[in-house]
Image: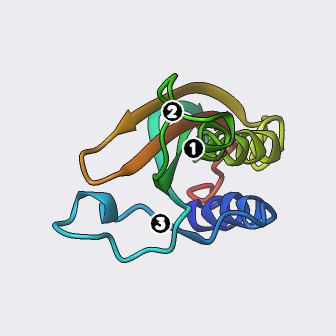
Amino acid sequence: MEQDELFLAITDLIGEVPSVAWIDMDFGQMDSEGRPAVGFPCALVSIDYPQITEIGQGVQKPNVLINVKLCFSYTGATNLKASSPVRERALAYYAIVKDVYKKLQGKRVGTGPLRRISQLESARPDQIKIVDISFATSFLDQSARQ
């Protein structure tokens, strides 16, 4: 499986989650000055090969790390004094995170199924909430085989 095929498979799966408005490769959009040029909520995808095992005869087995950065334009209040409906609306992004996780977890896009290995949440002063979900898988790369 080529890296572009892997990217397309991941983004196609995320595209099945109707509440995600924008899906793209992570080019650092969230690091730019001002408001990022994306639709919210968005999913930004990056793919890395942190470790590659040599099989031999032009065949390798990359361990693949797929990071899905879910970004939300966050509004609302979650403090204890806020009304229940206000708190529920403010926490609604958790449902999208869960939907993306469920769409990817266990799916075969390489030789092995996708496995969630971490999920980290961060907040920014510009009211953008980011949830980074990392998945791992592997596949056989036979592109150098002769």
Q: Earlier in the sequence, mark 1 or mark 3?
A: 3
Q: Residue at x 56, y 57 (%)?
A: 144
Q: Residue 64 sits in which quadrant?
A: top right
Q: How many marks?
A: 3
The residue that disc 1 covers is 90
Q: Is mark 1 on a helix, strand or loop?
A: helix
- Residue that appears at 50% across and 74% down: 39
Kindly identify the amino acid type of the residue bearing the numbered disc 2.
Answer: Thr
Query: Is residue 146 at least partly visible in the picture?
Result: no
Kindly indicate whether the residue at mark 2 contacts the one at mark 3 (C-beta within 8 angstroms): no
Marks 2 and 1, how far apart in space?
6 Å
Give left or right: position of 50 versus 113: left
Question: What residue is shown at x 83% (from left), y 43% (from top)?
Answer: 107
Q: Tell whether 51 sits left or right of 114.
A: left
Q: Where residue 3 sits in the image (x, y, percent)?
A: 57, 60
Please, what secondary structure does the residue beneath circle 3 have? strand
User: Residue 78's mark?
Assistant: 2
The kind of residue on which mark 3 rests is Met
**Kind of residue sitting beneath label 1:** Ala
- Quadrant in the picture for residue 143: bottom right
User: Closer to the camera, 66 or 43?
Assistant: 43
